[in-house]
Image: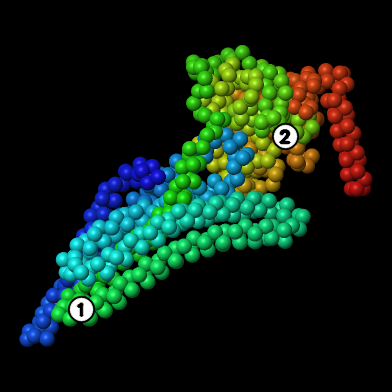
Amino acid sequence: MVLRLWPYVQPNRGYLIGSLVILLVMAAFGLARPLIMREALQGFQEPGSVDRLTTYGFLLAGVIAIEQFLAFPQMYWVQIAGAEGMARLRREVFTFLQSRSLAFFDRTPIGRLVTRVTNDVDAMGEMFSSGALNAVGDLVRLVAIVIIMVSLDAKMSLFAFIAVPPIALFVNWTRKRMRRAYREVRTKTARMNAFINEQVNGVDVVQAYAREDKSEAEFDEINAAYREANMNAILLDATLDASIEMVGSICIAAILWYAGGYQLGIDFATLFAFVAYIDMFFMPIRNISARYTQIQSALAGAERVFQLLGSEDEDARLELASGEAYEDWPSKEPPFAFRLDGVTFGYKPGVTILHDIHVEAKMGETIALVGPTGSGKSTIASLLLRLYEAQEGSVEVLGADVRQLDRLELRRQFAVVPQDVFLFPGTIASNVAAGHAEPDPERVREVFARIGATDLIERREGGIDAPVQERGGNFSAGERQLIAFARALYDDPPIMILDEPTASIDSDTEAKLQRAMDAATEGRTALIIAHRLSTIRNASRIVCLHKGAVIEQGTHDELIEHDGIYARLYRLQVAREAIADRVGKLAGA
């Protein structure tokens, strides 16, 4: 797992190498302290001992000062390497998510993905910034201490060395348990993030149905599971640290007992230095155990991140699926705008949404899809954009099978105006020019003029640079849809998809949007998904769907004459609108 992380920090290896060198120098200075104290204490009762103590005192102070001075670049450089490396990894994860299909997001909770990009990557960064490299320094320091202790007194060193095997066995015993514990913490963190995400996004429903108590009860359950997982990890960590501390104290007591009872001839200065090295001997062991805990947490995060990066998503291939790319696509005179030929599709195995769909649109035609909710209208639009792959049949755009086209290039041929418009935080201009690094102010004003919505920007302070809050919360539904129309026209694509753009607004706003729709569809191919059938009377062809199948298609007049489902839906809707209009007039009288 560590080897898989190396490519992300490798560009900053200079910082890592420099930090390691400084770390080793600091370790050498730290190891010199007890020896300096030993030299200072030897013969401290002899004549001239004050000068001796003063000299070694200044030497010790200088060593400590240099050690602390070097601590800044050592810590700073390793932090830079870790932060830069994890920024690269975080970007790779984000880019990976950007290329996933909608099917991937349908089956993966958003909160879990947020945890991968944030918490899990942060844990890995901590390992690189302070865990792994310092563990190497602790290991080198431990080896050096062993050599010094043996050179001072080999017999007394045995008291410390005897403690190593039981500590090693205990660390090995806790290793697997800590790995599982931190993996469980990561899982519970992802679950909590997912729950908070869905509750915040659905807060209007929560409040409308007064289900705050139920949501709080569910959160308490998730929070308790998260707390329990954390407590298990903390318990293992604390047990390991306390055990090593206890063993170290026992060893120091045993050495003092041994020196007092069996080696009365040992000088005080050497005993002082040896006890100091004993304490230092267990310090890197304690540090390594603490780093071990940190590394286990990081490895649990790394395991989950690389599991995500290695996950298969057959619908997410941006390269050619089969065959060779069409040359000179899109051609200047394609045989048709789009065509679905025998398309069958289902979001889940065994559950078919579309059955043997045959729909074709010539260049410049307006095709309208109508039918009850769940009949497959929006699914057809998703297949044209290759957000999903058809299980059977072919989907073709501008004369080419979408499976043999780069998705990004394919989607540049479309503009989409959804019913539920999503606006990003920023400005009106940045939302209209969503696919561009910088908006063209003149172009933005031009598209607003084309759809007859210049008043929208004129009455806003800042005009096209007026701020847009998260999800466009400072705009009405109609204003958001007008901005969506402007966004659709900004790149002037050949095909327009209007997904129920007037389904959830009042009649006055619908009139404005109807003018915008006419401007958006003029001179281009359009696919309109509508509930208000009055908006599609002039469509080139109306396709009526029911339970995922095309049951009839034709012009408005042809379908009215046919007197099928469309005719009945149309008459019912006209009657309903007439009643609503009459009720409105009576209410205003």
Judge whether 474 appears above or below 219 on screen.
above
Q: Is residue 55 shown left or right of residue 377?
A: left
Residue 46 can be seen in this image = yes
Q: How far across and down, in percent of the image, does residue 362 sit?
A: 66, 17
Kindly identify the residue that appears in the image at 37 percent across and 48 percent down.
84
Q: Amino acid at mark 1?
A: Tyr
Instruction: Classify 10 Å Cα crowding around label 1: few (below 14), some (14-19), many (20 and above).
Output: few
Residue at 46 percent across and 42 percent down: it is 306
- Report the Cα–Cα distance between label 2 and label 1: 93 Å
Q: Earlier in the sequence, mark 2 or mark 1?
A: 1
Q: Which residue is mark 2?
A: 500
- Quarter residue 43 falls in: bottom left
Work out whether residue 438 can be spotted.
no
Instruction: Please name whichever residue, 216 or 369, is drawn nearer the observer in this view of the structure.
Output: 216
Q: Give the label, 2 or 1, closer to the camera.
A: 1
Q: Secondary structure at mark 1?
A: helix
Residue at position x 54%, y 16% in the image: 331
- Direction from residue 178 to residue 471 in the image, left or right: right
Q: Position of residue 15 (x, y in %)?
A: 28, 51
Q: Is residue 95 above or below residue 355?
A: below
User: Measured from the top left, where is residue 301 in percent x and y?
Assistant: 47, 50
Relative to 234, does residue 179 appear above or below in the rendering? Answer: above
Which type of secondary structure does the marked residue at label 2 adopt? loop
Three-letter residue code for mark 2: Glu
Q: Is residue 555 above or below residue 431?
A: above
Q: Which mark is residue 262?
A: 1
In the image, 336 versus 237, the foreground residue is 237
| Residue placed most toward the observer, 544 or 439 | 544
Looking at the rendered image, the quarter that the N terminus falls into is: top left
Residue at the image position 28 percent from the left and 58 percent from the top: 139
Residue 586, located in which quarter of the rendered image?
Answer: top right
